[in-house]
Amino acid sequence: MRIVKDLHTHTYYSHGKGSPRENVLRALELGLSGIAVTEHAGGNIWFGVRGRKLERLNEEMAALRREFEGRIEVYNGLECNVTGFGRSDVPKDRENYGVILLGYHKGVAPVNGFNLHILSESFGGKSTPRRNTESIMAAAEKGRVDAISHPGLYLKVDIPYMAECCRQLGVLMEINGARVTMTREELIAARDKGAKFIIGSDAHTPDRIGDCAKAIEAAREAGVLESVVNLEL
């Protein structure tokens, strides 16, 4: 049992250690059919890739896609950030990216009242799971995102409500290979609401590409394996 595509990986363009090419070569070595590089988008103060650096990354990914055509699918992606209520840093040229993930991350400038609140909550302040979820899903709809990365990490969310929204929008919920952020009960509840899942390694080094054992085991224990779209049973 393994994933067939790893659509959540990082490189030295943000806070990873390897290059995009090394990620692709590792995925090819593992026999995967697809690999995405999903660096943090520009709204993240610490790790966001923006400006000329983003242009270089896009150029490198386009070259890799051409080089490996017919051998493995190479996706240029971004892991985007919630930047306010219903707002994100999904780029205007969204159609130029094969994979867009969206999640809440620390390191986003608190430019408005809601962001100040979620910044406070992520450091132990008052929790508002339903409103947090409404914000993330409104941003997901506007940005036409593919998946919600690590739901519940840093910021509490209403998983059943998120799952229902994801089902309606056709957005996947990630079971993260580096840290499983949903409990067994939450995974079951999400499946029962009709949500589909994707497993991503969230690899920050090439040797961790495809390393999703924790996520696969969590999905197995919750009985949701058949709802994971990139899993070969």
Image: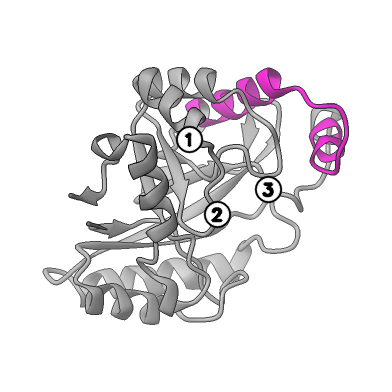
Q: Which residues are magenta?
A: 116-141
Residue located 49% across and 81% down the image: 18
Residue 59, by quadrant, is bottom left
Residue 179, by quadrant, is bottom right
Going by the numbered disc 1, the residue's amino acid type is Arg
Going by the numbered disc 3, the residue's amino acid type is His
Give the camera-side residue of 73 and 224.
224
Residue located 74% across and 50% down the image: 106
Between the C-alphas of marks 2 and 1, the distance is 13 Å
| Residue 105, numbered circle | 3
Between the C-alphas of marks 2 and 3, the distance is 14 Å
Relative vertical location of residue 57 with respect to residue 87 in this rendering, above or below:
below
Mark 2 surroundings within 10 Å by alpha-carbon count, few (fewer than 14), some (14 through 19), many (20 or more): some
Q: How many marks?
A: 3
Q: Is residue 124 magenta?
A: yes
Going by the numbered disc 2, the residue's amino acid type is Arg
Of the image marks 2 and 1, the number of the one nearer the N terminus: 2
SS at mark 2 in the image: loop
- Give the percent coordinates (x, y) of residue 129: 69, 23
User: Circle 1 sits on which residue?
Assistant: 184
- Give the percent coordinates (x, y) of residue 183: 53, 37
Q: Decide if residue 137 is on the left or right side of residue 61.
A: right
Q: Is residue 81 magenta?
A: no
Relative vertical location of residue 207 with respect to residue 227 in this rendering, above or below:
below
* Residue mark closest to the camera, 2 vs 3: 2
Marks 1 and 3 close (CB-CB < 8 Å): no
Mark 1 surroundings within 10 Å by alpha-carbon count, few (fewer than 14), some (14 through 19), many (20 or more): some
User: Circle 2 sits on which residue?
Assistant: 179
Residue located 37% across and 80% down the image: 21
Q: Decide if residue 184 is on the left or right side of residue 124.
A: left
